[in-house]
């Protein structure tokens, strides 16, 4: 059985990756509709060797569409997704528009696939940093009950879109090039600033990690404090994660659990300089974990290093995996 699938925001970095992953994973696409703004209409994108013309997104485009993958930003999603649902389309939305809506499941298939079945037409794809972290932490939470997470992220510029990548490359060649995407130069620099600053001094990105973690794990007792940082890397978000658990977990026990965890690849042999690297993880769909060690400052604590491709598992792959739950 094949499905009529639409990709909204098809010409963006994540949209193009969604199309690529639909092909790589051999998703049963009977018909593919590519949608974007008027500015991108008419572009040609190849899928399974056949050219597809990008059309202007409008409500009637969803007539007959079974599944729509949205990557067009929160504003367009709020406007268009409800219209698509009226046509009977299941919308999997990559923006922040619906993530904390109590009526919309927020899903990472390795973590809470069951939640997807409760949808009312829209399913939200979590934040890229939250996805990578929770794929790694869910098996440990099941084993020892995580109480507290302290995370610092090292996020790639592709998370800000193609313009950010272009800006970084321009600044590498010309350090005096004026920043436009970011408030400061990103080449040869590190910016402790992702999202908008809130009155409490945290950014919206940092609060996303707290709020989304609690919703996905269905546990309001977990607390997450985050510092989200942009680094001059093309692809793959890295995270230094510290967890405090109710039950004691040794590093050896954690490694054994993660060896068998869905969607996780353990790379933890520091004696031979083996640990997850952004360059190596780029282009992969798994979440890579290493540098697992005890936090000696608390009774039940562990430190982990987590890396995942932000365009793939952090966005497009996770969305396609959600769609696969309905095949």
Image (tube, rainbow, N blue to C red):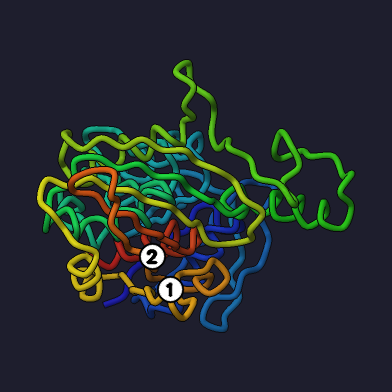
Q: What x and y, as percent, mark residue 107?
A: 27, 51
Q: Residue furthest front?
A: 296
Residue with the mark numbered 1: 270
Q: Residues within 10 Å of mark 1 (few under 14, many from 20)?
A: few
Above or below: residue 120 compared with residue 285: above
Q: Badges 1 and 2: C-beta atoms under 8 Å apart?
A: yes
Above or below: residue 164 compared with residue 222: below
Above or below: residue 98 compared with residue 260: above
User: What's the residue at 28%, 57% (across, down)?
Assistant: 294
Point out which mark residue 33 bears.
Answer: none
Q: Quadrant of residue 270?
A: bottom left
Q: CA distance from mark 1 to mark 2?
A: 7 Å
User: Quick one: label 1 or label 2, which is nearer the N terminus?
Assistant: 1
Q: Quadrant of residue 22?
A: bottom left
User: What's the residue at 29%, 51% (across, down)?
Assistant: 295
Residue with the mark numbered 2: 291
Frontmost residue, 35 versus 232: 232
User: What's the residue at 71%, 33% (across, down)?
Assistant: 183
């Amino acid at each position: 059985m094949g499905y009529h699938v639409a990709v909204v925001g098809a010409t963006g970095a994540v949209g193009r990756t969604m199309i690529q992953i639909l092909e790589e994973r051999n998703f049963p696409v009977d018909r593919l509709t590519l949608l974007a703004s008027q500015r991108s209409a008419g572009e040609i994108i190849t899928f399974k060797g056949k050219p597809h013309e990008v059309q202007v997104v409008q409500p009637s485009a969803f007539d007959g569409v079974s599944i729509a993958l949205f990557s067009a930003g929160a504003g367009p999603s709020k406007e268009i997704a409800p219209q698509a649902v009226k046509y009977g389309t299941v919308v999997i939305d990559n923006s922040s528009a619906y993530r904390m809506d109590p009526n919309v499941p927020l899903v990472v298939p390795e973590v809470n696939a069951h939640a997807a079945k409760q949808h009312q037409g829209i399913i939200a794809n979590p934040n890229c940093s939250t996805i990578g972290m929770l794929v790694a932490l869910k098996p440990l939470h099941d084993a020892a009950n995580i109480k507290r997470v302290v995370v610092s992220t090292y996020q790639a510029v592709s998370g800000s879109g193609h313009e950010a990548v272009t800006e970084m490359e321009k600044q590498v060649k010309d350090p005096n090039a004026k920043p436009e995407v970011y408030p400061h130069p990103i080449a040869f620099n590190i910016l402790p600033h992702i999202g908008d600053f809130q009155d409490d001094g945290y950014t919206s990105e940092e609060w996303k990690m707290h709020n989304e973690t609690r919703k996905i794990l269905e546990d309001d007792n977990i607390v997450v404090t985050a510092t989200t940082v942009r680094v001059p890397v093309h692809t793959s978000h890295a995270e230094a994660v510290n967890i405090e658990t109710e039950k004691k977990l040794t590093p050896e026990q954690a490694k054994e659990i993660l060896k068998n965890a869905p969607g996780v690849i353990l790379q933890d042999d520091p004696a031979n300089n083996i640990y997850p690297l952004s360059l190596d993880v780029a282009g992969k769909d798994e979440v890579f974990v290493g540098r697992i060690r005890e936090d000696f400052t608390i009774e039940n604590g562990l430190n982990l290093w987590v890396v995942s491709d932000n365009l793939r598992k952090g966005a497009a792959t996770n969305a396609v995996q959600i769609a696969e739950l309905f095949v």
